[in-house]
Image (tube, helix red, strand yellow):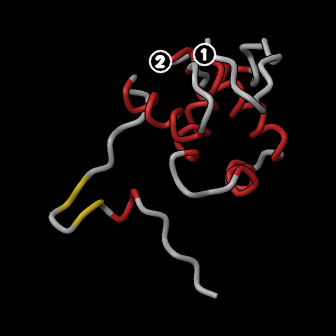
Amino acid sequence: MTACPGVSMSCDDPYLVTGSQSATLPGDLTERQVRVLRLLRGSLTLTEIATELSLSPNTIKTHTQAIYRKLGVCTREDAVIRGLDQGILRSPIRSGSGISQTAVRPAQSR
């Protein structure tokens, strides 16, 4: 595993959630970690992801560090790429006019 500056590798607990969500999936990720990885793919900040999942931002940071460790990456972009490569994430569906609207986060009006 590559050492990543600024990423704590001290979280050795593979069970960051309890109950049925502790079952592991491809890449040894829990269901909750896969949900976080899917949201990391978009442009949401960690705080916005926390709000979306009704979790604390610190919990999202812990999940993100565990995802990076389990996938052997150091960045959000590399985690998404590894998720795509391992089949954890699906490639966006492309229509004749580009990426489908479900894969694109709508712009916020001000």
Residue 82 on image: x %, y %: 45, 28
Question: Where is residue 47, by image quadrant?
Answer: bottom right
Quarter of the rendering containing residue 36:
top right
Image: 79 above or below 52? above
Q: Is residue 81 left or right of residue 20?
A: left
Q: Quadrant of the C terminus?
A: bottom right
Q: Is residue 83 left or right of residue 59?
A: left
Type of residue at label 2?
Pro
Under tag 2, what secondary structure?
helix
Residue 62 versus residue 31: which sits nearer the camera? 62
Q: Which residue is mark 1?
A: 23
Left or right for 77, reference 48:
left
Asked if 103 appears above or below 20 in the picture, the reply is below
At which x and y percent is residue 109? 58, 85
19 sits left or right of 96 in the view: right
The disc label shown at residue 26, or none: 2
Residue 41 spot, x, y in % from top left: 51, 46
Residue at (32, 48) in percent of width and height: 92
12 and 26: which is toward the camera: 12
**Element type at marker 1?**
loop
At label 2, counting other C-alpha atoms closer than 10 Å, the crowd grade (few under 14, some 14-19, many 20 or more) is few
Name the residue at the bottom extreme.
Answer: 110
Residue lying at 60% horizontally and 36% vertically, measured from the top left: 75
